[in-house]
Amino acid sequence: MAKSIKIRAKEKGGVTTVKALMTHPMETGGRKDKKTGKTIPAHFIQEVVCKHKGNTVMMAEWSGGVSKNPYISFKFSGAAKGDDLELSWTDNTGKSDSMTSKIK
Amino acid sequence: MSNEMKRRIFLKRSLAAGSVGVAAATGLLAPQQVLAAWNKAAFEAKELSGALDALLGSSDVSESADIKVKAPDIAENGAVVPITVDASIDGVESIAIIASNNPVPLVANFVMGPGATGFVSTRIKMGKTGDVVGVVKAGGKLYSAKKEVKVTIGGCGG
C-alpha cells in the first residue's frame, strides 16, 4: 500500500505540534451508491496511534463521523528536535499503515 | 449542470432517503469488528449520555469555561467541518468530540499520553445542524463545552 500518511511535527519551546493527514475514504456505512441503490459498506479508520520513543503520546478512536482523508493536530511536550515520531492507523477492515517522521 | 451541483443534489436526496435507513445502517458497522480496543458500545450509542457512559464510564459532565470548542458558525459543507478543542485544564486524559445530531453522535475520542496537552484539532462530518460537544476528562472528572454549528448540506450522506 502506498504511504497514506503525511506527518509534520515541529518542536518549539518544549512543545511539539503534530499535524497529520491520512488518505482514507472514511465510509460511514450509511451512504448509498447513487447508481445501484446499495449501501456502501462501512470503511473507516478506527484507531490512530502516535508514538514517540515507544511511548504513546496520543491514541484516538474514531467512528465514521470523521471526514474523508482525515486531518488531526495535537500537541505534546517532552520531545526534542530530531526525535522520531511514529503514527499508525488501523481501519475496520483490518488494514493498517504507519509512518515515521523526524520532529523538526 | 456542473458536477458540483449534481453532487449537491445527490447529497440532498441521499440525506432524505437515508434518515429511514439510519437505524439499519449503524447496525451494519458491527460485523466487521476487528479491534478489541475499539469501544463498540460507545460508538453505537444513539444518545450523548449513552455514548459517554460506555466510553468514559460516566455521563456526569459539568460545563467548563476552560474548554474552548472552535468550529465555524455555519458549515456550508457538512462533510468537512473543522473542529478544535482546546482545554486549558491540567492533566487532560482524554478528549471526546461529539456531534449531537449525527446518526453516530460520538465522532472521535482522543486518549492523550502523559506529555500531551489538552489540544486536539480535526475535521468531522455533520449530518445536520446541531451542537458540537467537546468532552474533556481530567483528573477523573468530565468537563464539557459546546458550540452550535449550522449545517447547510449534510455530510453524513444519510
Image: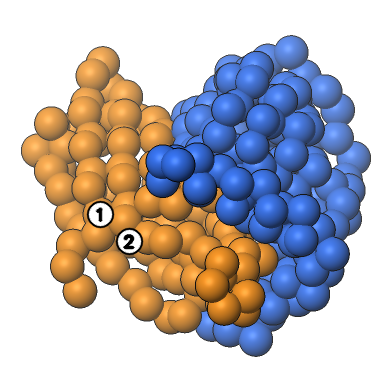
**Residue B38 seen in the figure:** no
CB under 8 Å between discs 1 and 2: yes
User: Tag 2's secondary structure?
Assistant: strand
- On the image, which quarter does residue B145 sit in? top right
Q: Amino acid at mark 1?
A: Ile
Toward the viewer: A69 or B154? Answer: B154
In the rendered structure, which disc, 1 or 2, sits on the residue that comes first in sequence?
Answer: 1
Identify whether B111 is placed above or below B54. above
Q: Quadrant of the C terminus of chain B?
A: bottom right
Using the rendered view, name the quadrant where residue A10 is placed: top left
Seen at 9% across and 38% down, the residue is A82
Q: Is residue A90 above or below residue A73?
A: below
Crowd rating for badge 1 (residues with CA inside 10 Å; few <14, some 14–19, many 20+): many
Q: Is residue A35 above or below residue A15?
A: below
Residue at (87% x, 52% y) in the render:
B47
Kindly indicate which chain is depicted in orange in the rendered structure. A
Image hue for chain B: blue
Rendered location of residue A81, percent (x, y): 13, 32
- Disc 2 residue type? Ser
Please provide percent x and percent y for residue B55: 74, 57
Q: CA distance from mark 1 to mark 2?
A: 8 Å
Kindly identify which residue carries mark 1: A5
